[in-house]
Amino acid sequence: MLLVQRSASLLLIRPQSSACKRFVSGRARQPTTGARRSIVAMSGSLSELHAIPGVCVNPDPSTQNFVFQQTMFRIRDPAKSLDFYTRVLGMRLLAKLDFPDMKFSLYFLGYEDVKDIPEDPADRTVWMFRRKACLELTHNWGTESDPNFAGYHSGNSDPRGFGHIGFSVPDVYAACKRFEELGVEFQKKPDDGKMKGIAFIKDPDGYWIEILNADNARQFVGWGK
């Protein structure tokens, strides 16, 4: 968990490549030959992955019980963001932590069965911090009603850095049809551009969210049946 002060920027890394820009805007180049020619190159074996420079094949045993637990977004209005992630994307609010002295609150969301969520607040917080892939929303109090607050940087305009988070769904087209009915803003619809079958939507703060289907990945790497 990262305790933060109000900031209009996210961690900045190297600018997004032109190839990535074409991908999310639907302008990725289509293969010129072969009905199922691969759009992307992909290693075909674990040994090839292990041979990539910088990869540690046998992580230190002391990291065995490490868990990738959260990604954090700063948000302007928790009511709008919580509605989006719970109603539109079906996540559950697992915990909320308030820090009155520093005037901010943290909301943690994930995909968990309600029957598994502890009732006791302390037990629930400990349980939540053991979950995988939670979304942490950080609200600095007052941003929702501050007319001078310009919003946060999504990472997808210069200077670029952070790109997006992703959700795997059973049916991209069915999910996007529902998103359209709910008035969700799209960055890319499933049939836009050359990369078919994936979409990018935006949350209330403009962060990009990829909507994908795991089985469709076979098509992207030329392994379609």
Image (cartoon, rainbow, N blue to C red):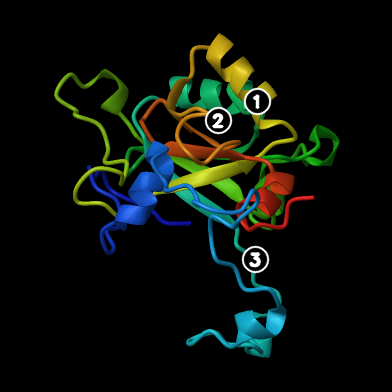
Res. 21 in view: yes
Q: CA distance from mark 3 to mark 1?
A: 32 Å
Task: Residue lying at the far right in this picture: please name it.
Answer: 115
Residue 86 in the image: state x and y as whole percent. Answer: 61, 26
Q: Residue at x 58, y 88 (%)?
A: 51
Residue type for callout 2: Pro
In the image, residue 64 sits, relative to residue 135, either above or below, namely below
The mark total stands at 3
Query: Looking at the image, which residue is at 55% across and 66% down?
Result: 41
**Which residue is the site of mark 1?**
173
Residue at the image position 48 percent from the left and 39 percent from the top? 194
Q: Residue at label 3?
A: 67
Disc 2: which residue: 190
Q: Quadrant of residue 92?
A: top right
Left or right: where 15 falls relative to 60: left
Q: Are marks 2 and 1 in contact (CB under 8 Å)?
A: yes
Mark 1 residue type: Tyr
SS at mark 2? loop
- Image quadrant in which you'd find residue 112: top right
Q: Earlier in the sequence, mark 2 or mark 3?
A: 3
Image coordinates for residue 157, horizontal then vertical, percent: 24, 43
Label 2: few (<14), some (14–19) or many (≥20) C-alpha neighbours in 10 Å: many
Q: Quadrant of residue 19?
A: bottom left
Horizontal placement of 167 versus 188: left or right?
right
Image height of 167 relative to 80, above or below: below
Per the image, label 3 sits on a secondary structure element best described as loop
Q: Is residue 174 left or right of residue 8?
A: right
